[in-house]
Image (cartoon, helix red, strand yellow):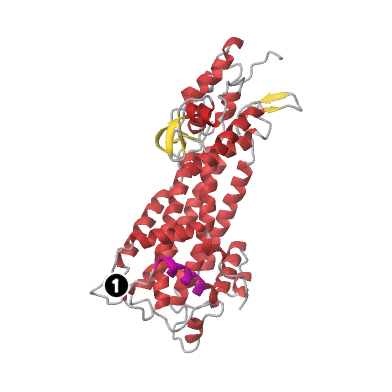
């Protein structure tokens, strides 16, 4: 009412912010914004990712600083509750000014335009909304901008990747404990006093969990006396230090994503109590992009140490009496030889993904938007990297379980035996060469389920 220009309400966007928009065109301005910015390409995002970004955008609007009506939040939630998911292409955002293209594809659906998926079938969204009794929206001032200017695609995929990474970390400690016992390793390096001498919280937590996972192992007791080895290799001995570093990295990522998920991330922001509308930069996803780059580095290192444990399980020069490649008849059979090759391929992919996206800024919008976060690229990398980690860990679990079988009649700890029994529910011991791909997919799903996260306690030995 003051007559002062308000970005995206009485003006154009980006480099066109100096173009004044007359009152009679301001509704068209918002619709044009959504249609023009729905310019993503590529395969559609996973349904879970689309649901995450829709929910997070609704939550951001509900913060009350976006200058829009409550009905926008209600419509987003109505689509979610009806299982209607706009088709959102995976490419189209540089993470500043927010995730414009992905969010525009969602906003387009609220106008009754574009394709959407419901029950695995893609259809025009207008028909799906009509069938569900959801009315098409006509946008008011700033509402198109409020819907598309935010970091919710980056953050949504990031949150899903973080949750999967946290589950995978817990599975990594189960796999590591099982591998250590199968290799006749010692849990002595996990003693509490060693961790207290270097008291990083992640290291202490991982060591405590490994102690709990290995407590009461008959296999350990069988070689406690008279073992000529002075120390285990780093991939066994340094699990608390390596896993703990990943645990701390993921803790940092969690803190960043929790804050971002509950923030107002568009521009300009409206502060009703002060009676001001202020342009700012909360749409810039640099802190999220950097956090997700860190997530990739952390999970790549978890995969690296896991692959080294697989090598020790399969190498007859290192495996403390286990048959070569854990085959029942080495030579005639190859056992898990090529499973390790697959792990190395996955690890190579993860190392490529570890290159940071957050340093790859490219200027856009006629040099107005001259530093960007590449947040969505970081999120895509994170999702792919966690998928690779889960598969590497599946290979270790398969090999470690076979190693435990070869230590019979000795039993491992209660927690390791529980994990072994769970694996054997779905994947039988390898008594002759067979195609391993289906078994690895089964174990990957076991890791994703989170079942292994509950195993083990922090009981001290």
Residue 267 appears in the picture as rendered: yes
Judging depth in this view, the residue of 420 and 208 nearest the camera is: 420
Q: Give residue 140's position: percent from left, percent from top.
A: 61, 20
Residue most toward the right?
A: 273
Above or below, 413 against 36 in this view is below
Residue sitting farthest toward the left: 332
Residue 211 magenta-drawn?
Answer: no
Q: Residue at x 53, y 40 (%)?
A: 51
140 over 294 or under it: above or below: above
* The image quarter in which residue 278 lies: top right
Q: Is residue 272 left or right of residue 324?
A: right
Label 1 CA crowd tier, 10 Å (few <14, some 14–19, many 20+): few
Question: Which element is circle 1 on?
Answer: loop
Q: Main secondary structure of the magenta part?
A: helix
User: Can residue 283 be seen from the camera position used here?
Assistant: no
Locate residue 404, reporting x and y percent.
43, 76
Q: Is residue 425 magenta?
A: yes
Q: Is residue 221 above or below residue 457?
A: below
Q: Residue at x 67, y 35 (%)?
A: 63
User: Which residue is rendered at x = 29% and y = 72% of the image?
Assistant: 432
Quarter that holds the N terminus: top right
Q: Residue furthest bottom?
A: 226
Which residue is label 1 attached to? 432
Tell me residue 458's x, y (percent). Answer: 62, 70
Residue found at x 51% / y 35%: 84
Residue 437: quarter of image: bottom left
Q: Quadrant of the C terminus?
A: bottom right
Report the front residue among 417 and 393.
417
Q: Position of residue 255 (x, y in %)?
A: 62, 49
Q: Which residues are magenta?
A: 416-427
């Amino acid at each position: 009412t003051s007559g002062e220009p308000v970005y995206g309400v009485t003006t154009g966007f980006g480099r066109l912010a100096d173009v004044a928009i007359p009152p009679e065109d301001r509704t068209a301005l918002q619709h044009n914004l959504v249609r023009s910015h729905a310019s993503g390409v590529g395969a559609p995002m996973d349904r879970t990712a689309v649901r995450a970004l829709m929910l997070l955008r609704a939550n951001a609007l509900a913060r009350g600083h976006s200058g829009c009506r409550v009905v926008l939040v209600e419509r987003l939630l109505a689509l979610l509750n009806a299982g209607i998911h706009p088709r959102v292409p995976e490419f189209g955002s540089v993470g500043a000014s927010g995730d414009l293209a992905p969010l525009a594809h969602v906003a387009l659906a609220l106008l009754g335009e574009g394709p959407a998926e419901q029950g695995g079938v893609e259809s025009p969204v207008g028909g799906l909304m009509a069938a569900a009794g959801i009315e098409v929206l006509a946008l008011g001032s700033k509402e198109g901008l409020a819907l598309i200017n935010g970091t919710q695609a980056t953050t949504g995929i990031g949150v899903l990747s973080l949750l999967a990474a946290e589950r995978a970390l817990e599975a990594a400690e189960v796999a590591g404990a099982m591998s250590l016992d199968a290799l006749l390793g010692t849990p002595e390096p996990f003693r509490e006093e060693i961790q207290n001498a270097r008291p990083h919280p992640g290291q202490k937590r991982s060591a405590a969990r490994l102690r709990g996972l290995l407590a009461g192992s008959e296999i350990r007791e069988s070689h406690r006396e008279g073992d000529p080895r002075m120390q285990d290799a780093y991939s066994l001995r340094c699990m608390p230090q390596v896993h703990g570093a990943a645990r701390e990295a993921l803790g940092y990522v969690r803190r960043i994503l929790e804050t971002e998920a509950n923030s107002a991330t568009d521009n300009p922001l409206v502060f009703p109590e002060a009676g001001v509308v202020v342009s700012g930069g909360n749409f810039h996803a640099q802190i999220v992009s950097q956090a997700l780059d860190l997530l990739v580095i952390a999970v790549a290192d978890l995969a690296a140490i896991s692959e080294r444990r697989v090598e020790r399980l399969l190498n007859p020069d290192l495996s403390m009496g286990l048959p070569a490649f854990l085959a029942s008849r080495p030579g005639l059979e190859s056992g898990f030889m090529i499973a390790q090759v697959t792990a190395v391929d996955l690890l190579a992919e993860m190392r490529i993904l570890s290159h940071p996206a957050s340093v790859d800024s490219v200027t856009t919008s006629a040099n107005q938007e001259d530093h960007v976060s590449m947040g969505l690229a970081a999120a895509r990398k994170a999702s792919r990297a966690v998928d690779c980690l889960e598969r590497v860990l599946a290979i270790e679990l398969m090999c470690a379980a076979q190693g435990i079988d070869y230590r019979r009649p000795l039993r491992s700890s209660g927690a390791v035996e529980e994990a072994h029994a769970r694996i054997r529910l779905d994947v039988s011991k390898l008594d002759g060469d067979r195609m391993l791909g289906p078994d690895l997919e089964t174990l990957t799903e076991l890791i994703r389920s989170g079942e292994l996260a509950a195993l083990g306690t922090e009981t001290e030995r």
